[in-house]
Image (cartoon, helix red, strand yellow):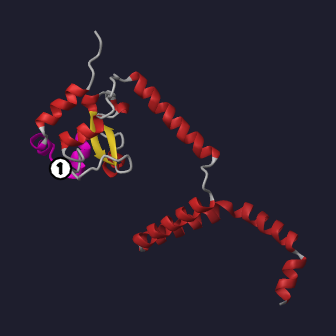
Amino acid sequence: MWRREYWRANAEHLQRERRRRYKEQRDRIAAREKASRIRRRDQDPEAFRAQRRVKKKRYKIAHPEPTPACREMFRRAKRARRARKRGAITKPIPPNFLALAIAAFGGCAYCGCALDGSGKTTDLDHFVPLSRGGAHAPYNLVPACKRCNTRKSARDPFEFLHDLGTDFTRYNRSLDKSALLCLIDAAPLEAG
């Protein structure tokens, strides 16, 4: 009871004192908190990930709009991608290309899972990434599930397939050759 009264009477002074102490010991407190996080993560990684997911979900609910810094980061990444795309060999991509590519590959080009063609689960991936000199053209685009496309990122495709534990010759045998020819025919040729 007396503590509450003391806190109410001296709230401003106590807050100033707490801030001053924190500033003096900021590095030590941060190191202690980091060590504690690492210890919790190492003791029970699954619980730690679950706790992180809950915190992210709460944050998204509390902050539905992206912060200005976050928006700027997205803008910078988009500008960089556009610049890489401008520097790459570019050929027009037909509107029905995704459906044709799924038919030719019979699913994800990397893991082989079935694709429904919706934007939520399916992406067109640059087989050789733009950042590694790949072209933005039909011959360099393959259908990929969101999971594989995200995991591959800007990595070398053969290195990624090796890490997945798959052999690329499997895709060579399973490709529908007639659908692949439709893919090539669907891509308009460059004028002269």
Q: Which image quarter is the C terminus in?
A: top left
Q: Residue furthest left?
A: 173
Residue 154 appears anywhere in the view: yes
Label 1: element kind: loop
Q: Quadrant of residue 22?
A: bottom right
Front in this rendered view, residue 53 or 92: 92
Residue 155 vs 87, above or below: the answer is: below
Q: Which residue is mark 1?
A: 166
Q: On screen, 21 above or below 157?
A: below
- Inspect this view and state whether residue 127 appears: no
For the point 32% across and 28% down, the residue is: 93
In the rendered image, residue 81, in percent from the top left (x then y), is placed at 45, 32
Task: Name the amino acid, label 1.
Answer: Thr
Residue 178 is covered by the magenta coloring: no
Q: Which residues are magenta?
A: 158-174
In the figure, is residue 177 to the left or right of 5?
left
Q: Residue furthest right?
A: 9
